[in-house]
Image: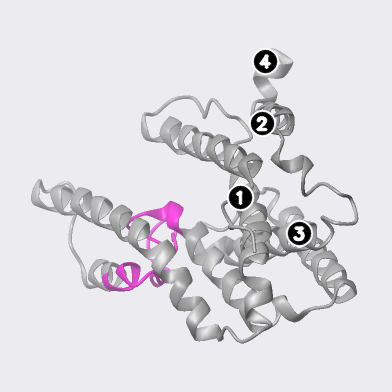
Amino acid sequence: MQSSRAFITLDALRGIAALAVISWHGGRLFGDDGPVFTSAILAVDLFFILSGFVLTHAYEQRLNTGLSVPDFIRMRLIRLYPLYLLGFLVAGLAVALRLYAGMAEGSTALGVAAVLNALMLPNPATGSPPFLFHFNFPAWSLFFELVANIAFALFGARLSLRQLVIFVAILGAALIAITLRNHSFDLGASWRTFDGGLARAMFGFFAGTLLYRLRDKFAFTARIQSTTMVVVLAAFTLATFLPRIALGD
């Protein structure tokens, strides 16, 4: 079986998406008017799609031939948790320094949030806005990624192509409805948009699974490896993230 790291085009897209996410949060951190990548929020959804595609390639057959759900979850935690923990510790240090400098006040709720966030679990609905992850709010995407992974292991890997198409269509409809209700696609970071974050992760992940299932029908397994495809898709992705620059705004 091919390595799950075999798709160099997807690695290129993942790198562009990572830079887009950095620009989105970096602009806000430094008080700029807004992120340079004006549609960089879509990079998170690209990550979900890439994850669904790659994990289906790496684990679908194994899940259907004996790999247990607990073992799959353990492998995913080994993959995801170390980097998550590093981010939590850096954010925790920043919070500790603010407390020491008297720029913030400690509380029981903050302690509870610290314990839960350290375990990669969302904290209670406190604060304004009530972020799921008080110490490192972008971690919401990793949490929902893990939820989608568990759903994939429990039943997604065993869905027929027809069932998968129907499931993705239902998830897409739910995501559209939630987006219209909130008048925004910026969903998932806070408790107010918890359902939107779940819909984004589930739709993106299983759309990636569907793309993988359809790869042979469209004969792009080999094409996706080509240098030409890397350049074309990378340029298209970058243009998607930079609509204002492209339009001269």
Find the magenta span and give its range.
115-139
Q: Give the number of the disc on residue 6.
A: 1
Q: Quadrant of the C terminus?
A: top right
Q: Quadrant of residue 41?
A: top right
Mark 1 → mark 3, Cα distance in angstroms: 13 Å
> Which badge, 1 or 3, comes first in the chain's sequence?
1
Mark 4 and mark 1 lie on one chain; the one further toward the N terminus is: 1
Q: Is residue 46 visible?
A: yes
The residue labelled by disc 4 is: 249
**Foreground disc of the pair 1, 2:** 1
* Residue under the image location 65 percent in, 40 percent down: 9
- Left or right of residue 159, residue 234 in this image: left
Give the quadrant of residue 212.
bottom right
State the image coordinates of residue 128 (x, y, percent, origin top left).
41, 56
Distance (Cα) linking label 1 and label 2? 17 Å
* For residue 220, above or below residue 134: above
Which badge, 3 or 4, comes first in the chain's sequence? 3
Mark 4 lies on a secondary structure that is: loop
Q: Earlier in the sequence, mark 1 or mark 2?
A: 1
Which residue type does callout 1 highlight?
Ala
Where residue 234 is drawn, which disc sits there? 2
Q: Which mark is residue 212?
A: 3
- Predominant secondary structure, magenta span: loop
Q: CA distance from mark 3 to mark 4?
A: 37 Å
